[in-house]
Structures are given as C-alpha cells and as structure tokens.
Image (cartoon, rainbow, N blue to C red):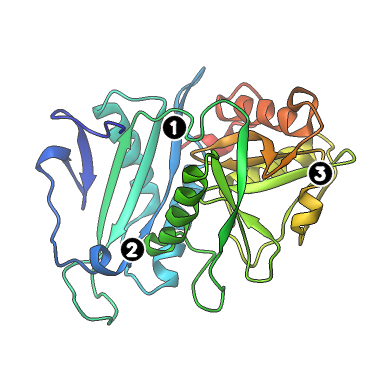
C-alpha cells in the first residue's frame, strides 16, 4: 500500500493549505455516498528548467468541464489553482509527483443537484503506475458504460467503480491489467488509460464517443504527427487487436507503457523496435522539457 501522506504532508483544501492528517470531510457527503464528484490525475516533473506541471491548464480545464457537465458548481479560477498547485508541491518538497484535485459535494442525502462544492488538491510521490515492464493484458468481461447513461467524456468519481471491477478481475486471473470494450464490443480503453495499436507501420486508436478523451492520448496523437507516424482514430475490433504488431497504454499515471500480450496473443514486434517505443521516448523528452515543446508544461 502506498504511503500517500504522513504527519508533515500538506494539502490544499477550499483555498487554504492544511495538514493532511488534520483535514476532515463529512460522512454524509453526496460524493461519498453516490460517487457524485469530479477529479483529475496530473503529473509534475523535475525538468532542466525546474519543477513543471505537465499540461496543467488542460487538466484543470477538464476538471471544470467534468464538474459542470454533471451539474456540480465550479467556482474556482483555474490559473489560481495552477499557482496554488505549484505552491503545494513546494510545501511538500516534491518535484516528480502525482497531483490529485478532487471536487466533492457537501452533506446531501437526496439525489438533487448540489448547490455548493468543495475542492481538495493532494500531491504525493508515485512512480510508474503500471510499472516499467511490458504488460500482460486480459480482455475484461466488463464493458465501458453506455454513453447515453453517463457523461463518459467527463472524469467522474462514480465512473471508476467500472474500472475497479475490470482491474480486479484481470489481476485475480494473473494478468497485469484489463482492456474493456464499448457497448458494441469494440476496443474501448483500459481501467485508467487509453489504448493504441500498431499495424504495418501505422498507429490506430479508438475514436471518441465511448471513451474518456485522455490528455495523454491527445499528446500521443500530437507526437505521432510530429514524428511523421500515420495515425487513425477508428473503431477497432478485438480480432484486429489480436492481429496487431504491437500495442500500448497511455495515461497521466501510466505515461506510455507497452504490452507484451493480449489474452493468449503475444505481439510479434519487438517493443524496442516499435512505434510505441518511439512515442514513449518522445513523450518522456516532452514532459522533461528536453525538446522545444515546453509551452504545454509551463505555468
């Protein structure tokens, strides 16, 4: 179990910096009981130019979008939150860190809209979420929610029960992670990451509509264009994936991590020679500001 905080850890709560050990929430909160909250996963990196939060604006803008899409009041200024996050990292003496903002609702036992909300930002030291080794992936028996039943394009707390079920199922069967399909049986995404596959020198990824539009996913598409790698967003069948040359997950927590196998299928292309490896290297250079593309990672 990771140690997310200790007696000295500071978090940001409703505009103030407070000790994590002293922070409290109400057990009658609507978010706790019904999953009615919004959150983000963000990373900061120790770069040659100092501590940088990668794509901070995009993440806080999505946090606002997620909250407002389900009717949760959002009253914060995102530029001020970015500044507060940098200060929070400094107070916790962190550079390479994971950042978790959470918008949560006050005590409310009905299903009516919240009229106010709270904001918490926590930071902690967190390595590669899915590890460094190539992953063994299991096709999940669980599907991503019907987009007519949920705001699938928003990062909502309650959505992640679906992710937990898929992840637990895969790990119980001896795999590293799960892959979920959409309601039509096409490839969707992992419990906490988007998926790309390589075939005949080109990359493919599921089109939007049934998946979370990941910020790292958008970055991978941007990098593919810069590197001259053909890229297509489309519906991908399970059979297509099981005939691919290589595949990888990407996400803020996972970063870019390759697959070894999918169910019984072992990908034939050596990861070190794959397009995914090129993307992995370019992504790391980007977040560490070793390339000219630094604007997205700065305040």
x then y, percent, for residue 83: 35, 40
Circle 1 sits in a helix, a strand or a loop, which is it? strand
Q: Of the two numbered discs 2 and 1 on the same chain, state the one appearing first in sequence.
A: 2
Q: Mark 2 points at which residue?
A: 37
Report, in whole angstroms, how far the alpha carbon at label 1 lies from the one at label 3.
33 Å
- Of labels 1 and 3, earlier in sequence is 1
Q: Which quadrant of the structure image shows residue 227?
A: top right
Question: Tag 2: Cα neighbours inside 10 Å, few (<14), some, or many (≥20)?
Answer: many
| Mark 1 or 3, closer to the camera | 3
Answer whether residue 134 is visible to the viewer in this image: yes
31 is higher (above) or lower (below) than 215: below
Q: Residue 244 carries which label?
A: 3
Q: What's the distance in space between the residues labelled 2 and 3, CA to CA?
A: 37 Å
Tell me if label 1 and label 3 are in contact, CB under 8 Å: no
Mark 2 secondary-structure assignment:
loop
Q: Nearer the viewer, residue 96 or 57?
A: 96
Rate crowding at label 1 as few (under 14), some (14 to 19) or many (20 or more) other CA atoms within 10 Å: many
Secondary structure, mark 3, is loop
Q: Which of 94 and 160 is in front in this view?
A: 160
Instruction: Say which mark, if any, is on residue 44.
Output: 1
- Answer with left or right where residue 215 lies relative to residue 98: right
Q: Nearer the viewer, residue 280 or 173?
A: 173
């Amino acid at each position: 179990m990771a140690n997310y905080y200790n007696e000295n850890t500071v978090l940001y709560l409703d505009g103030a910096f407070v000790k994590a050990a002293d922070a409290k929430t109400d057990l009658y909160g609507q978010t706790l009981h019904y999953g009615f909250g919004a959150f983000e996963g963000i990373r900061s990196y120790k770069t040659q130019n100092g501590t940088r939060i990668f794509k901070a604006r995009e993440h806080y803008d999505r946090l606002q979008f997620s909250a407002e899409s389900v009717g949760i009041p959002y009253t914060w200024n995102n530029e001020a939150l970015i500044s507060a996050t940098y200060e929070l990292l400094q107070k916790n003496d962190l550079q390479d860190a994971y950042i978790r903002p959470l918008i949560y609702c006050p005590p409310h036992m009905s299903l009516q809209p919240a009229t106010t909300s709270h904001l918490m930002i926590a930071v902690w030291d967190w390595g590669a979420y899915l590890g460094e080794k190539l992953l063994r992936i299991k096709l999940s028996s669980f599907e991503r929610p019907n987009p007519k039943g949920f705001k699938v394009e928003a990062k909502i707390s309650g959505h992640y029960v679906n992710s937990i079920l898929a992840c637990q199922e895969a790990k119980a069967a001896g795999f590293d992670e799960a892959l979920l399909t959409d309601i039509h049986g096409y490839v969707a995404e992992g419990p906490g990451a988007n998926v790309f596959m390589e075939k005949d020198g080109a990359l493919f990824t599921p089109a939007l509509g049934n998946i979370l539009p990941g910020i790292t996913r958008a970055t991978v598409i941007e990098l593919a264009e810069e590197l001259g790698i053909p890229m297509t967003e489309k519906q991908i069948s399970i059979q297509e994936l099981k005939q691919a040359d290589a595949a990888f997950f990407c996400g803020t927590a996972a970063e870019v991590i390759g697959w070894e196998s999918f169910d019984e299928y072992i990908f034939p292309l050596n990861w070190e020679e794959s397009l995914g490896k090129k993307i992995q290297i370019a992504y790391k250079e980007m977040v560490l500001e070793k390339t000219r593309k630094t604007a997205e990672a700065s305040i």
